Amino acid sequence: MNAQNFADAATESPAGTPRDIKMVARDVNVYYGPKQAIKGVSIEIPTDEVTAFIGPSGCGKSTFLRTLNRMNDTVSGARVEGDIRLDGEDIYDASMDVVQLRARVGMVFQKPNPFPKSIFENVAYGPRIHGLAASRGEMEQIVEQSLKRAGLWDEVKDRLNDSGTALSGGQQQRLCIARAIAVDPEVILMDEPCSALDPIATAKIEELIHELRGRYAIAIVTHNMQQAARVSQRTAFFHLGHLVEYGDTSEMFTNPREQRTKDYITGRYG
Ligand SMILES: Nc1ncnc2c1ncn2[C@@H]1O[C@H](COP(=O)(O)OP(=O)(O)OP(=O)(O)O)[C@@H](O)[C@H]1O
């Protein structure tokens, strides 16, 4: 795809109206020591849509996702080059407060990882360290609203003091989503959020992603192409560290532009 086509594909909705863009990455390279895991990736993450990152194992999906909230800073030997902006702000600028950034760009991991604390405390922790509630009443409101948005309130409202780790896997993952929501993020990154869940819990998370769409920009890494087709409006196909193709999900699954994309979605490799 040439640069102009890339720009058109990235910034226009199917109806031809310009997309509202939340994050822009330009020419991003990521290295683990001498090994280059991401090679010159440029992409725009729209505000009101879900973007799926797909591609064979080891192609760099998770590595790239983690550049979007500087999670790679925590990996020794990892180095990121290029330009990544959130609402125009350079997230790798020395003046960027990384704790603040990770509240604005929240993350949900493959394996649900609630803190070994109560359900209430799991959700209240972030708002407390960010000073978002002036009183116990306000904190209770934030916790209730976050659990409601994460589709978990009805299941836990009578046992908010029980441990978060005692919930089922699917409930734990929704608790982690509530925890991300509680600090009022602009973007939610999800790294294979359903891979440890059974089909019913997976369906609930997918339903939830539909409900959260529009309120938060969402980027999700998934191995499951059916899931990408179900939950996303935009899909980015990665291969060997390159972004091979990026466009509307329905178009990519029915009429991929690149042979490598076609081979992947038709199951030739992966
Ligand atoms: N902490 C690390 N140290 C060194 N190399 C790493 C590290 N994390 C990932 N890599 C390498 O970077 C490349 C991209 O890995 P990444 O996990 O981003 O791929 P992925 O597409 O998300 O894979 P998967 O679908 O299997 O999770 C791989 O070759 C991987 O071995």
Image (cartoon, rainbow, N blue to C red):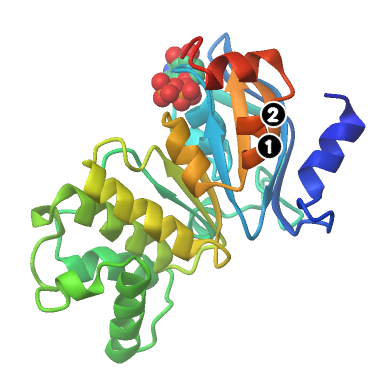
Query: Are dots 1 and 2 in contact, CB under 8 Å?
Result: yes
Figure disc tally: 2
To which residue does mark 2 refer?
255
To which residue does mark 1 refer?
251
Mark number displayed over residue 194: none
Query: Where 6 sits versus 39, above or below?
Result: below
Q: In which image quadrant can residue 257 be found?
A: top right
Q: In which image quadrant can residue 126 be found?
A: bottom left
Task: State left or right for residue 201 relative to residue 46.
Answer: left
Query: Three-letter amino acid code at disc 2?
Result: Asn
Q: Where residue 143 appears, x then y in whole percent?
A: 30, 76
Task: State left or right for residue 34 relative to residue 158.
Answer: right
Q: Secondary structure at mark 1?
A: helix
Q: Where residue 67 appears, x then y in whole percent?
A: 57, 36
Which of the pair 131/201 is nearer the observer? Answer: 201
Task: State left or right for residue 104 relative to residue 193.
Answer: right
Task: State left or right for residue 179 relative to residue 104.
Answer: left
Residue drawn at 44 percent across, 18 percent down: 57
Query: Where 194 sits versus 12, above or below?
Result: above
